[in-house]
Amino acid sequence: MSRSPRAARTEEDAPPTDWLAELPHELHLRILEGVDDFSDCAAFSLASPRLGLLALRSGLARFKDPLFAVAMRLLLSQRFVGGFGVVMLSEDTLRRYAADHRASADHFPWLARVSPALRLASEVEGAGERRTEVWRLRRGYNCAKLRLRFLRSGRVKHLRGERGAERKVRMEFPSGTVHCYEGERGAERMVRAEFPNGEVQHYEGERGAERMVRMEFPNGTVHCYEGERGAERMVRMEFPSGTVHCHEGERGAERKVRMEFPSGTVQYYEGERGAERMVRAEFPNGEVQHYEGERGAERMVRMEFPNGTVQYYEGERGAERMVRMEFPSGTVHCHEGERGAERKVRMEFPSGTVQYYEGERGAERMVRMEFPSGTVHCYEGERGAERMVRAEFPNGTVQYYEGERGAERMVRAEFPSGEVQHYEGEQGAERKMRAEIPSGAVQHFEGERGAERKVRVERADGEVQHYEGDKGAERKVCTEFADGEVQYYEGDKVQSGGCARSLPAAPCCTTRATKARSGLCSSFEGERGAE
């Protein structure tokens, strides 16, 4: 069986052993502390990356110095080209080093040694307050200025460009503030200001008219500005969470007018700076909430839904309770009760009909319905099973009902005159069975609904009258008196003009009278009144 390529390697092919790895950790640090040349530091790190990381994590000065990065870049370039050429530092590398605030002219001799053709040089110019340390990029006789350090004030100006065309790109102040510039020589304009606390200000506009357009804070918050130099006003605040505050007003009096949330919710505000109060909140689903009250005490007074429904609220902030709900159809629900326990007490319809409810939230039951005509229906029963038990009419008539919801049947009707009518039968087929007259008389009826005919009248004095015939054409056929006398009648009820009436000489006449007590029986013939 053949061996794999990895297994076939010989000891001569294996990389050299890292003998330093076998030394104690403390001895490693002592060795690294003794390396004082940046080239040696770079060589150590490339030969043993583990030691290089150890030096960086231990904070050894040589390995933290920006010149260490220059030495690493140079050594890597030399390894890349091998023995096929001479490697020197690039102009970009030297400019980057000179731009680092930790760079020092004390290391220029090392730079000249490793890169004699292109190096950094330092000299002092001027006198008194104008005394300046100048760093130059030296390439033969071409010595472009890279950095000016004003010894009196401590400010440092960084330049870029060829000799005679150097332009200011950065200004460092002793406080740690840094100004960055763009533009040609003599027209450099400030584009950014960096502060020690991590704040960064961005500017736009020509030299001398730069205006701040954005301020970035260490926590990720961003302020956006508009307006001319010196009158910049904040128009927008962006937070790391994605929330955005929009502002209006002149500089120093900017007031919050809108808050936009990542969820799509938008809140609107009114009022002067520092007293802005929320007046409206719009949600992604189309809902809109309206608020009233001073800042910090805003209370919701209205909520509008996409379908046109509107809810109204009352109560202090955090305790707002719904008191009214209006629907697009014109229907209105009225509620009572504390927040979270609001119960429906009334429903108003566009037709003018009003329904009244009782019971706790979620168990409201209808107890009364009022119609524009003045009619009132009264109900009993649990929610969803309310049944009508009474109907009151404007003329004073009252109807009473029995039966389950949807099958209520009228059983009694009371009239303002004092008359009471009693009914029997299923819903829609109720028929009048009895009528009680204020005089004390009781009328009895038979027949289907709408065709009830009077068959008997019981008077308060004990007299009983019996009738036969269809509704509206009932004729008296017998009268029973309290003393036992009974009278029988024959003849039809006369119709006149659609109304039934008995004429003085009507065909209906007494044919026989019987005295029950005496046994006397009298018989009669002839027209009524002439028997």
Image: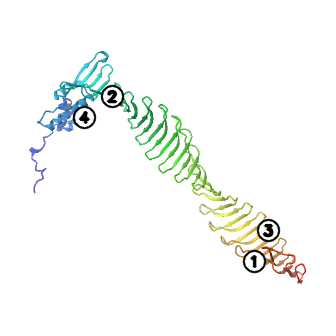
Tell me whether circle 1 and circle 2 mark residues in contact (CB < 8 Å): no
Look at 67% across and 67% down and name the residue there: 402
Q: CA distance from mark 3 to mark 1?
A: 21 Å
> Which dot marks residue 188?
2
| Along the viewing direction, whichever of 401 and 153 lies nearer the viewer | 153
The residue that disc 1 covers is 470
Whether residue 364 is visible, yes or no, is yes
Tell me whether circle 2 and circle 4 mark residues in contact (CB < 8 Å): no
Residue 407, image quadrant = bottom right
The residue that disc 3 covers is 437
The residue that disc 4 covers is 56
Whether residue 65 is visible, yes or no, is no
Instruction: Give the total of numbered labels.
Output: 4
Decide which of tag 3 and tag 4 comes sooner along the chain: 4
| Along the viewing direction, whichever of 210 and 137 lies nearer the viewer | 210
Decide which of tag 4 and tag 1 comes sooner along the chain: 4
